[in-house]
């Protein structure tokens, strides 16, 4: 029986939203990637907007959000490369918890590193944090960094 090429290979991913906790998660993900000699994926989630705004207002907000995430990812990539790690970057659209879990499944991620808290709205306090949802739904190991 032939083994798949990815079997036994570790792939680490980190959720990056630009919050203080996500930068701490990135630091830990870089350490893990170096120690395990594993590829590192930096994933940012552009949240979808469900409002009654006009189409042009929604498009403008989406562009602003995407531009902000691209700047965050560029800074994160530079930090990785200073440490000798060359990450793969991804910006996904959706709800942070669901989009991260989907990315993990589609890319055979073996460990996801996330910050304890991010840029969540008041709903995060009422419904549970994104980190809690990810830990519950993610098929791989999840390291929550404080």
Image (tube, rainbow, N blue to C red):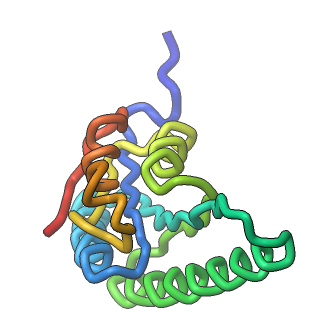
- Can residue 34 be seen here? no
* Residue closest to the eye, 144 or 56: 56
Is 82 placed left or right of 99 in the picture? left
* Residue placed furthest toward the top: 1
Q: In this view, does 101 lie above or below 143?
A: above
Measured as percent of width and height from the top left, residue 36 is found at 26, 57
The mark tally for this picture is: 0
* Residue closest to the eye, 107 or 4: 107
Residue drawn where x is 31% and y is 74% of the image = 22
Q: In this view, does 17 lie above or below 112?
A: below
Residue drawn where x is 63% and y is 58% of the image = 93
Residue drawn where x is 75% and y is 71% of the image = 53
Measured as percent of width and height from the top left, residue 104 is found at 47, 44
Q: Which quadrant of the structure image shows residue 35?
A: bottom left
Measured as percent of width and height from the top left, residue 11 is found at 40, 50
* Residue placed furthest toward the front: 52
* Residue closest to the eye, 136 or 70: 136
Residue drawn where x is 40% and y is 58% of the image = 13
Q: Which quadrant of the structure image shows residue 118?
A: bottom left
- Can residue 23 be seen here? yes
């Amino acid at each position: 029986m032939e083994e798949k090429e990815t079997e036994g290979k570790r792939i680490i991913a980190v959720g990056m939203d630009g919050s203080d906790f996500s930068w701490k998660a990135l630091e830990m993900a870089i350490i893990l990637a170096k120690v395990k000699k594993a590829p590192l994926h930096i994933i940012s989630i552009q949240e979808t907007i469900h409002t009654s705004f006009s189409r042009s207002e929604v498009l403008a907000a989406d562009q602003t959000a995407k531009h902000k995430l691209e700047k965050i990812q560029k800074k994160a990539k530079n930090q990785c490369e200073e440490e000798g790690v060359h990450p793969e970057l991804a910006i996904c659209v959706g709800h942070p918890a669901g989009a991260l879990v989907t990315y993990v499944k589609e890319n055979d991620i073996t460990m996801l590193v996330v910050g304890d808290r991010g840029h969540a709205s008041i709903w995060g306090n009422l419904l549970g944090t994104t980190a809690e949802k990810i830990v519950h739904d993610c098929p791989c190991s999840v390291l929550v960094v404080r």
